Image (cartoon, coloured by chain):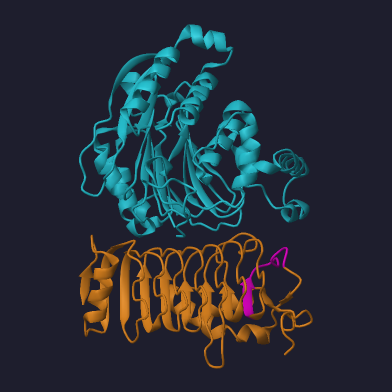
């Protein structure tokens, strides 16, 4: 189904997608409509334009491909599926994400992966091609965040990276380690073996946007994990 | 009886947008109206407003007062005050178009005025300070009168309603300016009344603000020592006075104003991120103007005669996007809004928290602003 989203309200647009039995959608002239594909399972949605905030919120297995820039809070609390952005995206990308994958070709805003979490086989992944703003992985509790810093001079993450991080991992491709990390975050150069851990996600990034996985992985990566010597786990209750 | 700010609390976002044609080309108000309409969900119909710069070329040398009156008595009293202090060159009701979603409008009047030379001389104040004091006087002392716009060759238009309806109500397509800003309100804490809509203004300074500042009372206590009256009990009003105080009265450059109100953290100062001179300067600001530090989430656009400045709080707790196309700079809460004004921008980026975006008219198009 193809939909010209010009002048359509977000509720009308989302109802058309929800009510249709089609599995593939192409939306054109999208401009600011919020909550596109919220909670959606089993469909594929191609978007041209600028989708509004909370794109793919609570996404439950659907695939979203954006040709353009996305705004704030894409994949908010998403549960499964994939969001692929051929462009940049805004703040709080993957906010409280539970599982599924987000790939962004360009830059992302502040608080990428804030409070993302994982449980057993539910393991969220965010891969950002360019740079990100401050508070990367704030309160991160699980999953993997990869920042590739392609074409970026210096470290591609902003200040206050990993504030409150207590689970999951971050991989940052950069010659210099992120500055000013909090005490509870442990930062070390990723070994060849550790880098293999993210090969399949970098592969997918390369499949979506081009580039070369081997070359990317040959560069220096910093791996950030919460420092288990300084755990939060006994802060409130002793268990 | 309509409730005013502070009388009840309504917890709730907001939207802001703006642009400036640095070459001085004037654009009619419909463009800015469309830019806010596409962010409809960020407002809740309890306030919307616009500021346009360069809209009164035929009266460019007079101060344009836009005034809300609750009653004819308030108008009579205010006009008597105006006659004592100003030469009123022209007065009229501001032309409106009835809109079914804009109701309970006050009396809305416009005056183009020059300060009376004798009064001005007697006051021993510079002209702009004289005008600002008169505006504060009316707003503080005359019950039922509120001057909501008081600059030269610019004007604020605001109301309770969705901003796109407010634009229709004030027939903004009939005004053209080189810069426009707009606000769609989703009142946090307060009921929303006409005076409480954004922009807030004093002289040519206008502020539209998305956020809720937690330093309001500290800021208010400090600024009220310098003759300002925070009558409206809203956080945006105090930001307007802070800018007036720092930029107009202390003649601080806007880059430094941004460093005062969105000062870098002590931890950043200690990290060696800034040069030694810069570190000293920021420390000085933090010490001397600690009460003017604005904390809590905010994204604001300041409008003034020759430019606009956009600024986010240091933690970037509200979204803001900037873009450039030729000589025009665009700022908005959301990219979609910029795309309605200009689908094919040359570049688009997200300013960092605390990083001001300052865009001014090119020197050869700049307006003369008196002291």
Q: Is residue B70 left or right of residue A13?
A: right
Q: Give the camera-side residue of B169 and B340.
A: B169
Q: Give the camera-side residue of A39 and A239.
A: A239
Residue range of the region highlighted in magenta in the rendering? A168-181
- The quarter of the picture where residue A86 lies is bottom left
Residue B163, position as x, y percentages in the image: 32, 48
Chain displayed in orange: A
- The quarter of the picture where residue B238 lies is top right
Q: Is residue A80 above or below residue B243?
A: below
Residue B326 shows up from this direction: no
Chain displayed in cyan: B
Q: Is residue B259 above or below residue B94?
A: below
Which residue is depicted at the point 53% across and 93% down? A121
Residue A108, position as x, y percentages in the image: 51, 65
* Magenta-drawn stretch contains A177: yes
For this orientation, the residue located farthest to the top is B118
Q: Give the camera-side residue of A69 and A233.
A: A233
């Amino acid at each position: 189904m193809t939909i010209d989203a010009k002048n359509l309200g977000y509720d009308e647009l989302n109802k058309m997608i929800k009510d249709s039995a089609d599995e593939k959608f192409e939306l054109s002239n999208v401009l600011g409509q919020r909550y596109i594909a919220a909670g959606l399972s089993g469909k594929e949605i191609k978007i041209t334009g600028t989708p509004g905030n909370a794109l793919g919120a609570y996404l439950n297995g659907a695939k979203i491909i954006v040709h353009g820039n996305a705004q704030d809070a894409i994949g908010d609390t998403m549960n499964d599926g994939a969001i692929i952005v051929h462009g940049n995206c805004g703040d709080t990308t993957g906010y409280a994400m539970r599982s599924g994958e987000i790939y962004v070709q360009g830059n992302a805003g502040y608080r990428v992966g804030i409070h993302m979490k994982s449980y057993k086989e539910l393991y969220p992944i965010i891969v950002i091609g360019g740079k990100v703003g401050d508070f990367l992985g704030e309160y991160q509790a699980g999953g993997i965040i990869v920042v590739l810093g392609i074409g970026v001079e210096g470290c591609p993450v902003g200040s206050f990276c990993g504030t409150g991080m207590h689970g999951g991992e971050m991989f940052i491709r950069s010659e210099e380690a992120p500055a000013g990390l909090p005490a509870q975050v442990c930062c070390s150069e990723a070994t060849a073996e550790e880098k293999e851990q993210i090969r399949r996600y970098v592969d997918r990034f390369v499949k979506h946007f081009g580039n070369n996985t081997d070359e990317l992985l040959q560069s220096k990566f910093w791996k950030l994990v919460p420092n288990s010597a300084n755990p939060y786990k006994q802060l409130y209750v002793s268990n | 009886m309509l409730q005013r700010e502070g009388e009840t609390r309504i917890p709730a976002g907001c939207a802001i947008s703006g642009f400036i044609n640095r070459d001085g080309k004037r654009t009619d108000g419909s463009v800015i109206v469309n830019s806010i309409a596409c962010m409809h969900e960020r407002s809740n119909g309890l306030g919307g407003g616009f500021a346009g710069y360069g809209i009164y070329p035929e009266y460019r040398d007079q101060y344009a007062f836009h005034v809300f009156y609750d009653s004819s008595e308030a108008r009579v009293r205010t006009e008597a005050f105006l006659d004592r202090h100003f030469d009123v060159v022209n007065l009229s009701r501001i032309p409106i178009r009835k809109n079914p979603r804009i109701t309970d409008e006050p009396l809305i009047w416009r005056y183009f005025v020059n300060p009376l030379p004798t009064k001005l001389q007697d006051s021993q104040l510079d002209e702009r300070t004289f005008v600002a004091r008169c505006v504060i006087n009316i707003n503080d002392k005359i019950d039922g009168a509120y001057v909501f716009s008081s600059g030269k060759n610019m004007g604020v238009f605001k109301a309770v309603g969705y901003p796109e309806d407010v634009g229709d109500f004030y027939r903004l397509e009939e005004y053209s300016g080189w810069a426009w800003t707009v606000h769609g309100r989703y009142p946090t804490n307060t009921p929303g009344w006409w005076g409480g809509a954004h922009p807030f203004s004093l002289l040519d300074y206008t502020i539209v603000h998305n956020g809720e500042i937690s330093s309001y009372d500290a800021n208010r206590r400090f600024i009220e020592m310098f003759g300002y009256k925070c009558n409206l009990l809203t956080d945006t009003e105090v930001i307007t006075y802070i800018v007036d105080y720092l930029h107009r009265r202390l003649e601080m450059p806007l880059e430094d104003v941004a460093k005062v109100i969105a000062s870098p953290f002590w931890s950043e100062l200690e990290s060696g991120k800034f040069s030694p001179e810069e570190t000293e300067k920021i420390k000085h600001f933090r010490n001397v103007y600690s009460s003017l530090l604005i904390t809590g989430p905010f994204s604001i656009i300041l409008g003034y005669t020759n430019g606009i400045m956009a600024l986010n709080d240091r933690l970037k707790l509200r979204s803001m996007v900037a873009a450039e196309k030729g000589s025009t700079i665009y700022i908005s809460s959301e990219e979609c809004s910029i795309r309605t004004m200009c689908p094919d921008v040359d570049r688009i980026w997200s300013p960092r928290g605390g990083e001001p975006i300052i865009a001014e008219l090119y020197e050869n198009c700049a307006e003369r602003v008196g002291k």
